[in-house]
Image (cartoon, helix red, strand yellow):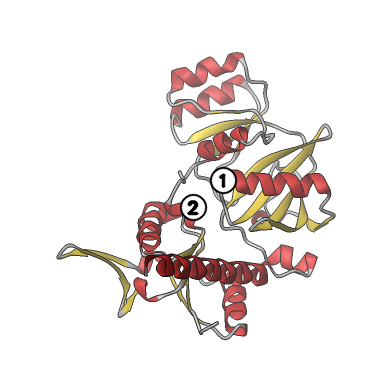
Amino acid sequence: MNKLKFVIIGPKTKNTEDLVSEIKKRNHQVVVLKLNELIFKFIDKKFKVIKGNINLDYFDIYIFRAFDRNTIEAQVLIKKLIRGNKVVIDDIIGNDFISGKIFEASRLIEAGVNIPNTWQALCFSSYKKLLSEIVFPVIVKPICGQKGKGLKKINSKKEYLDFFKHNEKGYFIQKYLPIKSDFRVMVVGNNALGAIERFIIKGDFRSNTSLGSKVTKALMNKDMKEIAIVAAKALNFEIAGVDLAKYKNKYYVLEVNHTPQWQKFKKLNKINPAEYIIDYALNKFRKASNFKRTNDNKRS
């Protein structure tokens, strides 16, 4: 294979360093660009995205990481790249994707995946009506939350009403599961690489590693593997961190993260997801190139 040009669009993190290292090991070129540093230009009936003297049309493979604050811009850029027959990971972001946990919940339910009972209303009066069917405590989550930020455990009707009186929009409700830990399964393509177990922080209800949760390697059983792959497919994510909880002998999907972090996973499982991601990206490029050559030959 000829030397390819990769671009990673996202922050310069340890995960990004892993990806860069794997790309260079395979003797390809790579640059890292932050999405918020790109300029979108619509001039003389032409649409360009640039960073300094770099035109984003220049690359062969595009890997998008951590763009939640600029989702619309990422989607516009990915749609442009797809129209130009570029290979994008994850290209679903430019196709059939809506940023928000309710979209995620709807897709998981359609796929027959167990999730905790979930509710969302759009005004205070509707939240009041939900009181007839929810049982406290419940967990309130931001629709576009990240790393456990903004999560709140609500223990009473009064606390519930006080919260939604001031937060009519931007939150949804989930049934509280009294668990001691949850699991993060790393998925690349149709391959579940392994899992870690994250323990609920003492005096809290969250298990986020960024908040100091204890984390250990987990033995990924058949059920965890199958559910994680189905959940990732339900959202059409090529790379995913699927969060599972086991409650009363049943697995529930808590979240499907399309730009998962993996340093803890890598350390505990002795598996570097970046290796699998770059192999997946190169394989996707080969398939796209072969498809293009076949179509070109048919037309000639």
Residue placed most toward the observer, 182 or 6: 6
The residue beneath circle 2 is 92
Position in image of residue 93 (x %, y %): 46, 53
- Tell whether 111 sits left or right of 59: right
Find out whether the residues at labels 2 and 1 contact each other: C-beta distance under 8 Å.
yes
Q: Residues within 10 Å of mark 1 (few under 14, many from 20)?
A: many
Kind of residue at disc 1: Leu
Residue under numbered circle 1? 235
Q: Is residue 189 left or right of residue 178?
A: left
Q: Residue at x 58, y 83 (%)?
A: 24
Which three-letter amino acid code belongs to the residue tagged 2? Ile
Q: Could you say which is closer to the camera, residue 127 or residue 5?
A: 5
Q: Residue at x 38, y 64 (%)?
A: 36
Residue 159 on image: x %, y %: 58, 25
What numbered label is drawn on residue 176?
A: none
- N-term-proximal mark, 2 vs 1: 2
Quadrant of image for the N terminus: bottom right
